Amino acid sequence: MTKQRELTRVSHHTKIVATLGPASNDLETLEHMIRVGLNVVRLNFSHGTPEIHQENAQRVREASERAGREVAIIADLQGPKIRVGKIENGKIELKEGDALILDAALQGEGNQKRIGLDYRDLPKDVNAGDVLLLDDGLLTLVVSHVEEDEIHTIVQNDAILKSNKGINKQGGGLSAAALTDKDHQDLKTAVAIGADYLAISFVKSGADMELARQLVAQAASGGQQPGLIAKIERTEAITNLEEIIKASDGVMVARGDLAVEVGNPAVPALQKIIIKKAREMRRFTITATQMMESMITNPVPTRAEVSDVANAVLDGSDAVMLSAETAVGLYPFETIRTMALVCAAAEQAQDPLTSADVQVQSSKRIDHTIASGAVFTARQLNAKAIIALTESGSTAFQISRFGINVPIYALTSNKLVQRKMCMYRGVRPLMLDISKDHHIGISEAESYLQWRGVLNSGDLYVITSGINMGQPGSTNTLQIVRAN
């Protein structure tokens, strides 16, 4: 029986990313999530086959068409598997003071005294005194000594360790490359299924992102390339933050692994630093991990989770992300709607542009200057909307860097550009193939937005365009218009 859901869309500027999984990959649920506020769908490449990813991407596109709203797709690569191996009976119970050997040469299942490793080079990366954090920090081990393939450790707290749980080194320093052989194949799959963005896990440097961009260019063979998102989750990524941001289209504050490596208390301040730096450098940001974790099993979030989402909005995040909440949770639709309501409320409380002007680096690029002028003008005149006629999406993106709460309607004739713009805060991307004549094109855009109920007669709006309509990178005009 079809569930009765409140499908009225919640108007919000901050974009919502949801991870697809068994709880959300049926067509009706996905359609309803899009209708109420979902903007971007994340496909987790840690699970599933290329065929499953293809099916999921097609399902997203079909649900989007049924909902009448375009969404973007992120393919999130797994990255290096730094994990323990299989354990007899699936788990062991450890006590404080126990000796435990991590054995990179172990074949078969581990036991109470010795467990294997998926990451065979771990013994080369650790020394006596190093702290290893397993299962997202629930188990702490201190290295006593290393003998060839064996890491001898002392258990620091009572815990149950299950098979295949992750390993982090406190303070960072693991040498595993960001892109594994599996990632190379998954990258090709992501391009083939038309992913709009590719998230690279465990990035350590700008070089990791540059390599990913080269591989994407090869896989795309001259076609449309997905944007690249660097997941900031390693200590080294904080050290090399600026070069990573520069080499990326956007960054994700991946607070789970980041917290394990740098410690929970450091994460809130780092979140603000990463978002601020990315905004200064004109890149988008996603804040992720446990944003509404309790809604995996409960129909409402905790007040702390509401505050967490709101603060991510107030920090200037372009998007906030859900993982298990929508992948395997009991209330994926309710979680999207709740998050949209929280985003909208936080945005209303925000004083836009009080500091945004100094958060974006100055530039002599024409589209950057046009964007700055559009935002300043819309603020001064209390404009109803900012409209960007764009072929590449660049001008709409640059306008969105200022965090203005005036809605930005980006009109493009390119479906792939429309999908990418679903990530940008405040941008409402729409498809419209308008005349190449500049004056007629402006008139067509106004008529279209009046038809959609965005503009009414007498409304003042700001519009950016190019004299040479239809050519990417040609934006050079800013106009103030009162709708007929």
Image (spheres, grey):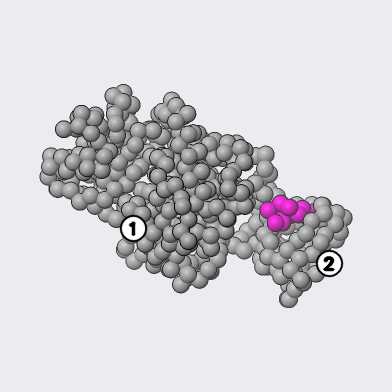
Residue 140 sits inside the magenta stretch: yes
Residue 419, relative to residue 14: is it above or below? below
User: On the image, which quarter does residue 263 sit in?
Assistant: top right
What's under tag 2, amino acid-wise? Lys
Judge left or right: residue 402 versus residue 154. Answer: left
Q: Main secondary structure of the magenta part?
A: strand
Task: Residue 121: give x, y in percent of width and height.
Answer: 67, 65
Indicate which disc, 1 or 2, sits on the residue closer to the N terminus.
1
Q: Is residue 219 above or below residue 203?
A: below
Which of the pair 78/175 is nearer the observer?
Answer: 78
Q: Is residue 182 visible?
A: yes
Q: Does the stretch in magenta take in 477? A: no
Instruction: Check the image and report above or below for 167 versus 88.
Output: above
Tell me the quadrant of the picture where the C terminus can be found: top left
Q: Tell me what residue is drawn at x 29 percent, y 55 percent.
A: 415
Closer mark to the observer between disc 1 and disc 2: 1
| Outermost residue to the top | 380
For image coordinates 29% across by 31% down, the residue present is 384
Looking at the rendered structure, the secondary structure element under dot 1 is: helix
Q: Position of residue 392 (x, y in %)?
A: 29, 49
- Image point 30% across, 41% down: which residue? 409
Hey, which residue is sitting farthest bottom in the picture?
Answer: 108
Marks counted in the figure total 2
Q: Which residues are magenta?
A: 132-143
Q: Which residue is mark 2?
A: 113
The answer to whether 193 is drawn above or below residue 155 in the figure is below
Which residue is pictured at 59% across the width and 62% down the height? 80
What kind of element bears circle 2?
loop
Which disc number belongs to residue 65?
A: 1
